[in-house]
Every structure is written in C-alpha cells, then in structure tokens.
Amino acid sequence: MQIQSNTFTNSKLEQFFVTMLQEVYWSEQHLVNVLSTMTGAATNDELIQAFDQHRQQTEEHVKIVERVFEILGLPAEAEPSMGLQGLFDEGWQVIDETDEGSAQRDVALIIAAQKVEHYEIACYGSLVTLAATLGETDVADLLRTVLAEEKETDATLTIIAESKINAQAGEETV
C-alpha cells in the first residue's frame, strides 16, 4: 500500500506504521462491542460507568484513526490484530468462568480490560513515536490524544479495583 502523504516515501518503516495503524483500527472497532459486553457483565456501578465511558471514547478513537488515514491519504482499512484478538477471547472466557453478579467477575473483568489497555498503550505509544520519526506531527498529535485517554482508563480501572472490588472479591466464598 502506497502512502500519499507528502513526507512519506513508502519505506519499510512507513509500511510497518500503516500495518500497525490498520491493526489498531481493527482493534478499536471490535473493542466497542467487547466493552458493551463487559458493561453488561459487570455488577459494580463505578465499573459499569467506566466501561460505558470507555466504549464512548473508543467510538471516538475509531474516528480519530479514520482521520489519521485521511491525513495520510489512505483508505481506512482494518487488519486483524492477533494479539488483541487473544485478549478479547480471554475477556469472553472470564465472563464464562466466573459467577454472574460476583465481585470475582468484576475483578476478572478489570484484569481483562487492563490487559487490553496495556496492549493499546504499547501500540499507541509506538505509533506516536513512529509518526514523529516519519515527520507526521499532526498524526502524532492525534494519536497522542488517544494514548492519553488509554492511560487514563487504565488508571481509572486501578482505582476502581483498589477502592472496593478487590476486597469484596476476597470475602466471597466458594
């Protein structure tokens, strides 16, 4: 795929950047549905609100990534991310393997969500660095915004876990 941006020369680094961008685009599109499921599976009100808020942010992330493709003069094409697919599958598994309405399920959902957040933080951090390296400062700025929101979501999930849910799960008996 040839990049139409004025500064891109279609190097191997640029091709790698585009592939990463396509994978993060696929991930954000699928994460909207995953977060809807996680919201429905959670019981803690703060957690439900956090998942719902992040789903709304994720819908905006899809639009931001589409804007990046537009800036680069490329069609917005998604490429499956095997890494995130595995983490999404793990999220479905924790729902299946935990008791509905339990704090244990909420703990498992937080852990599954944070694994996804950490993966996204790594992806967006790398994309920001690569965009800057490639001279795409507008792209780097857009992606930096998403990166900041992913970090904020991760911190929010930690606060929710530490505030009550982990302790509640520790009191649940088999």
Image: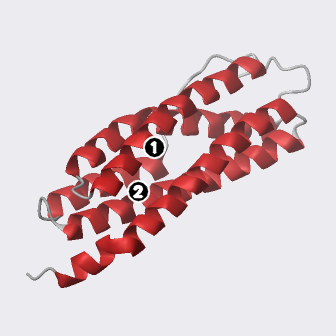
Q: Dividing the image into 4 quarters, which one contains the C terminus? A: bottom left
Q: Is residue 106 left or right of residue 83?
A: left
Residue in the image at 49% along x and 37% along y: 58
Helix, strand, or loop for circle 2? Answer: helix
Q: Position of residue 104 (x, y in %)?
A: 22, 70
Residues packed near mark 2 inside 10 Å, few (<14), some (14 to 19) or many (20 plus): many
Q: Nearer the viewer, residue 85 or 119?
A: 119
Q: Position of residue 17 (x, y in %)?
A: 72, 39
Vertical side of 48 occupied by 108: above or below: below
Write down the quadrant of residue 61 in the picture. top right
Residue in the image at 28% along x and 54% along y: 45
Distance (Cα) linking label 2 and label 1: 10 Å
Give the amino acid at mark 2.
Ala
Vertical side of 30 occupied by 97: above or below: below
Give the amino acid at mark 1.
His
Q: Is residue 173 left or right of residue 2?
A: left
Which numbered disc covers residue 113? 2
Mark 2 or 1, which is nearer the eye? 1
View extreme (left): residue = 174
Q: Position of residue 87 (x, y in %)?
A: 40, 55
Q: Dividing the image into 4 quarters, which one contains the N terminus? A: top right
Q: Position of residue 120 (x, y in %)?
A: 56, 51
Say which label, 2 or 1, has the lower sequence index: 1
Circle 2/circle 1 CB separation < 8 Å: yes
Residue in the image at 26% along x and 58% along y: 44
Residues packed near mark 1 inside 10 Å, few (<14), some (14 to 19) or many (20 plus): many
Colour style of the rendered protein structure:
secondary structure
Write down the quadrant of residue 67 in the picture. top right
Residue in the image at 41% along x and 74% along y: 162
Helix, strand, or loop for circle 1? Answer: helix
Q: Nearer the viewer, residue 125 or 82?
A: 125
Identify the residue position indicated by label 1 in the image: 54
